[in-house]
Image: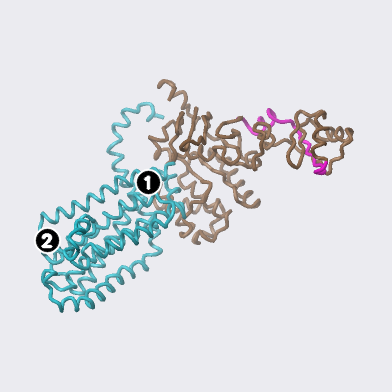
Chain colours: A brown, B cyan
Amino acid sequence: MSDPPGSVAGVCAPDVLIHARGLAKSFGGAVAVDGIDFDLRRGEAFGFLGPNGAGKSSTMRMIGCVSPPSSGELTIFGMDPVADGATIRARLGVVPQEDTLDVELTVRENLLIYGRYFGLPRDVISARTARLLDFVQLSDRANDQVEPLSGGMKRRLTIARSLINEPEILLLDEPTTGLDPQARHVVWDRLFRLKRRGVTLVLTTHYMDEAEQLCDRLVVMDRGKIAAEGSPRDLIGQYSTPEVLELRFDPAEHEQAGEKLADAPADRMEILADRILLYVLNGDRALATVRSLGLEPLTSLVRRSTLEDVFLRLTGRRLED
Amino acid sequence: MAASASPPAASAVRAPVAAATQWSLAVRALRAWLTNYRRTWQGSIYSSVLNPLLYLGAMGLGLGALVDAHGQGRLGGVSYLAYLAPGLLAAAAMQTAMGESTYPILGSIKWLKTYQAAVASPLRPADLFHGHLLFTTLRLIMNSSIFLVVMAAFGAPRSYWVLAAVPVAVLTGLAFAAPIEAWAVTRTKDQSFAVIFRFGMIPLFLFSGTFFPIAQLPAWIRPVAYATPLWHGVALCRALSLGTADLAGALVHVAYLAVFAAAGIAVGRRTYRRRLYV
């Protein structure tokens, strides 16, 4: 720790639940997390947005006290994750990226075993099980084996399991990766309800819509570093324009169109493999200008800027590649 | 926050508390295995009864009749059944231990990933290790007790000291379970298990004095047999069942087995940690 002992109390102000400075993790020679700083306050929904391999999961595992940091400073509830891991984990809920349910057991048994890990008495576990299964809409499957449940149901069960100890912070690593759109919306809805109840959420995602829907504040991560931090709206305001004009040309004209558009009155232009994006204040007006340059796109779309555009601007790459 | 304000005082009083909770945390992990076992216990009881029944029937009675017809001098003047049964008790404990400490461990890490789920709770890797060793101990007590009952039904024991052979068999099992589990947790593929079953368990089973006295082996290989934990388990279980045990010899055997178990526990705490805290 670089801070003098006297400042610890200040750093762990009551509403700061997680505090990281210069936090880093490497595996052998490979650097997964390369010195990141962030603070998480009680009641926030905080996100790590970035592509696969950005270091999000490694960060989550360090917060979950199952991966000792290689260097830097990390406190959770003001405690050290290495020395006080068990005490910290008693107050965390974890939804891992891959399902870790015991698929040979029933839905109820999974919650029973997990509740016992936290030392909860049986009657408390069964009362919470009833409530949690109701919350994740699995009450009718309570006595069914987990194996045949759908991916979305397993995810919801994992969420129910992570709540058995009534955690103060819920860690969700890619909570909807691999789910179909309908199942994702159900999960988002449940997470949104948790957030409304005041549960502090920390999630990683490479879906910009997930980040926009759920996160009050997020950091954009790329190659182990934090590229930007703020609320989704702030980030969009800071790093992008209000509107984006997406243009698609005949592949034969794609390159040429890009050259011509270099003079178009746009804040910024991104030439992707299949589309050209113009970052502008007013998309319709920009489209009129494009046409006046003698260009006729096959399709055009005016849309609001998203976190995807922020990411593109910050890293030059797309999120879901 | 109060705890972080006075860390030295807090850690000074923490030690005895931690020792107490270490047990309770291991018991939490044990109970997960027990919940799991509830689904399969019936099948496992059948094989726990059938295994001694078949071996004692075929080898003890069938083969034993031929052996006894050639005179019992080399067996110390007892029937082959009486000679074989306590040896098999120890060998069966080894088999139970090896079964419990290989595939279920890799399953928990690789296939079901329930270990990864468990370490996200207050349980630490060492608690999971201890919890599974407790479960293995219960399975050993169960199987060894059933074995003893079957042995008694065959009239194999010659002394009431045979009752003490059950804890010795359990310790023999742990002398295998702890080191093998410590190693199993480092594995990424289950092929390694087939190798130790084939080149570890079966030779031990056959050449550790279970079926015939070590003295029958060529002199040069005897030290190898004496060095294996199974021989110590077999020798002591046999001495207890035949009523020929002496205190000094028993202590040496027990100490030898305990060292294997203790070393396995010490190593396993590290390997579990290394595998689960990446």
Could you say where residue B159 lies in the image, as x and y percent from the top left?
Answer: 13, 67
Which residue in the protein does label 1 denote?
B272
- Subunit that carries the residue with mark 2: B
- Subunit that carries the residue with mark 1: B
Q: Say which amino acid is labelled 2.
A: Ala
Look at the picture and state if B132 lies above or below A199: below
Q: Is residue A319 left or right of residue A279?
A: left
Q: Is residue A314 left or right of residue A114?
A: right
* Marks 2 and 1, the one that precedes in the sequence: 2
Q: What's the residue at 30%, 55% (across, down)?
A: B177
Quadrant for residue B94, please give it. bottom left
Q: Which residue is more in the foreground, A5 or B199?
A: B199
What is the crowding at mark 2: few (fewer than 14 residues within 10 Å), some, or many (at least 20)?
A: some
Which residue in the protein does label 2 denote?
B245
Q: What's the residue at 14%, 56% (across, down)?
A: B250
Look at the picture and state if A120 lies above or below B6: below
SS class, disc 1: helix
How far is mark 2 from mark 1, CA to CA?
Answer: 38 Å
Could you say where residue A178 lies in the image, as x and y percent from the top left?
Answer: 60, 50
Q: What's the residue at 50%, 28% (across, down)?
A: A22
Answer yes or no: is residue A113 visible.
yes
Look at the picture and state if A48 lies above or below A185: above
> The magenta stretch spans which residues?
A229-252
Quadrant for residue A263, please give it. top right
**Pointer 2 and pointer 1 on the same chain:** yes
Could you say where residue A226 lies in the image, as x and y percent from the top left?
Answer: 57, 31
Q: Say which amino acid is labelled 1.
A: Tyr
